[in-house]
Image (spheres, coloured by chain):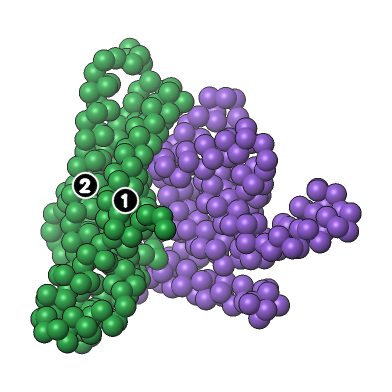
């Protein structure tokens, strides 16, 4: 006999899946943001060759399907190097790099939004390059980048659903399991969709809050 | 570790077939997305609060729920409603609906970018609201939206790889078959990644040129 009804345990299963999705999302976003910012700094310091290499790799990551990137890491790398890669590791690695590629572009344009004169003025006043980066560039660049970064993170949350295809039991995979067992696609995928939607809204709200705080100094205060 | 790309040579035909299917899906989905997008953009630009509300909710929902979840909703849900369509039709439908949410933003900003003087001139000439919208506003808005619609198309191409999960053997789906036949997953997916990246890159150049050509008069005036 097939156990086709929804039970209280399904809620635990869904929350488990949501937890896996959010954990992967938060950790890969953190790693991706840090890595993307570091790559942008490499560009700022004009390291030879590194700049071209970074541009090539980020363009590749931005212009190919995440699903193909996941397959390359999960099926390709173990076959080529004869190593074991768990689905979770492959998902983490791919998503972190993918996020870094998009963060890199955002950070580069944020840094470029700052007037050159400010950097030159800082140098003339005797600040070191690090001090210019820390006290002149970083605060303004962070404020500038928060908006696009929030949009990116909302998008990356949805990209995490793809890891279900390589076997990570995230929210989408749980939905798949429940769908196969209960054969009630409308209920299952609506619930899964609502959970993703709420998570996306929370990220957008948090991003909006941070952006307002960081740009408060330049907000319109009236004449 | 040894890299052998030549093993893929016998399977080029299968991959080409997959690529063709990807092109078919994307062209149809682009057409669908523009139609849906234009309708939603019209609703968002309309005076009726109800229509504006519906359009906003539509865009909000389809932009904030993962495409994979939307796809499964349609793929498993449609037969439940007694609509039996194959993976191809389901894929085109899902891509059009999701792409429409993105296209509506583009077309809406195209509508908002139109000089109010043009619309006023049309009204002075005594054209009806309908004619003004369909014959004056829409052509200019769509022409101005060629480049951003191109980014929507590129996004559709990348997103269409997800259709391989509902058994549609487009480019990514056929690459999966080749990978399991040749036991060379790294080479297959590396080539696939390069193919997608160079395709979308060439396409973005072509779209930028097309955009400049179509908007010659408009852009020179600015």
Crowding at dot 2, Cα within 10 Å, few <14 / some 14-19 / many 20+, comes out as some
**Residue that appears at 67% across and 36% down:** B48
In depth, the one of B187 and B55 nearer the eye is B55
Query: Given the current orientation, which residue lies at the most extreme front position?
Result: A223
**Residue that appears at 25% across and 33% down:** A17
Secondary structure beneath label 1: helix
Q: Which residue is mark 1?
A: A212
For the residues carrying marks 1 and 2, which lies nearer the camera in this image? Answer: 1
In depth, the one of B182 and A103 nearer the eye is A103
Residue B106 is labelled as none
Query: Label 2: chain?
Result: A
> In this orientation, does residue B129 appear?
yes
User: Where does the image place residue B65, in percent across and percent down from the top left?
Assistant: 41, 40
**Residue that appears at 17% across and 87% down:** A124
Please tell me the colour of chain A: green
Query: Given the current orientation, which residue lies at the most extreme right position?
Result: B126
User: Where does the image place residue A197, in percent across and percent down from the top left?
Assistant: 38, 36
> In this orientation, does residue B18 appear?
no
Q: Decide: is A143 above or below A15.
A: below
- Does the CB distance between marks 1 and 2 fall below 8 Å? no
Secondary structure beneath label 2: helix
Chain in purple colour: B
The mark nearer the N terminus, 1 or 2, is: 2
Q: Which residue is mark 2?
A: A26
User: Where does the image place residue A148, in percent across and percent down from the top left?
Assistant: 36, 58
Name which quarter of the figure residue B26 lies in: bottom right
**Residue that appears at 57% across and 71% down:** B207
């Amino acid at each position: 006999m097939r156990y086709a009804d929804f039970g209280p345990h399904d809620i635990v299963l869904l929350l488990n899946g949501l937890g896996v999705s959010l954990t992967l999302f938060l950790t890969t976003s953190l790693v991706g943001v840090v890595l993307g910012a570091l790559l942008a700094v490499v560009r700022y310091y004009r390291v030879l060759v590194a700049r071209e290499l970074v541009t090539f790799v980020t363009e590749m990551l931005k212009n190919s399907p995440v699903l193909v990137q996941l397959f390359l890491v999960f099926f390709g790398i173990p076959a080529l190097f004869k190593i074991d890669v768990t689905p979770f590791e492959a998902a983490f690695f791919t998503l972190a790099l993918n996020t870094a590629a998009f963060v890199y572009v955002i950070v580069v344009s944020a840094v470029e939004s700052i007037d050159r004169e400010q950097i030159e003025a800082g140098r003339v006043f005797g600040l070191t390059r690090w001090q210019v980066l820390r006290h002149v560039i970083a605060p303004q660049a962070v404020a500038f980048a928060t908006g696009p970064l929030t949009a990116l993170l909302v998008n990356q949350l949805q990209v995490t659903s793809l890891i279900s295809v390589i076997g990570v039991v995230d929210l989408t995979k749980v939905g798949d399991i429940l769908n196969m067992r209960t054969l009630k696609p409308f209920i299952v995928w609506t619930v899964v969709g609502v959970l993703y939607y709420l998570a996306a809204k929370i990220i957008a709200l948090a991003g909006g809050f941070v952006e307002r705080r960081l740009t408060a100094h330049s907000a319109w205060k009236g004449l | 570790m040894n890299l052998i790309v030549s093993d893929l040579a016998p399977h080029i035909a299968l991959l080409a077939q997959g690529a063709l299917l990807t092109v078919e899906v994307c062209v149809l989905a682009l057409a669908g997305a523009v139609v849906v997008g234009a309708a939603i953009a019209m609703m968002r630009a309309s005076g009726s609060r109800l229509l504006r509300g519906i359009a906003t909710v539509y865009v909000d929902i389809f932009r904030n729920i993962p495409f994979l979840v939307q796809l499964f909703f349609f793929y498993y849900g449609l037969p439940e409603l007694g609509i039996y369509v194959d993976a191809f039709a389901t894929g085109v439908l899902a891509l059009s609906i999701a792409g429409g949410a993105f296209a509506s933003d583009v077309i809406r900003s195209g509508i908002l970018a139109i000089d109010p003087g043009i619309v006023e001139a049309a009204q002075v000439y005594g054209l009806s609201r309908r004619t003004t919208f369909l014959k004056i506003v829409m052509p200019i808005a769509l022409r101005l939206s060629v480049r951003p619609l191109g980014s929507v198309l590129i996004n559709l191409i990348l997103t269409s790889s997800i259709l391989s999960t509902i058994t549609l053997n487009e480019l990514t789906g056929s690459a999966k078959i080749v990978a399991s036949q040749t036991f060379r997953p790294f080479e297959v997916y590396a080539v696939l990644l390069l193919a997608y990246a160079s395709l979308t890159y060439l396409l973005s150049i072509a779209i930028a040129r097309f955009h400049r050509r179509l908007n010659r008069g408009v852009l020179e005036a600015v």
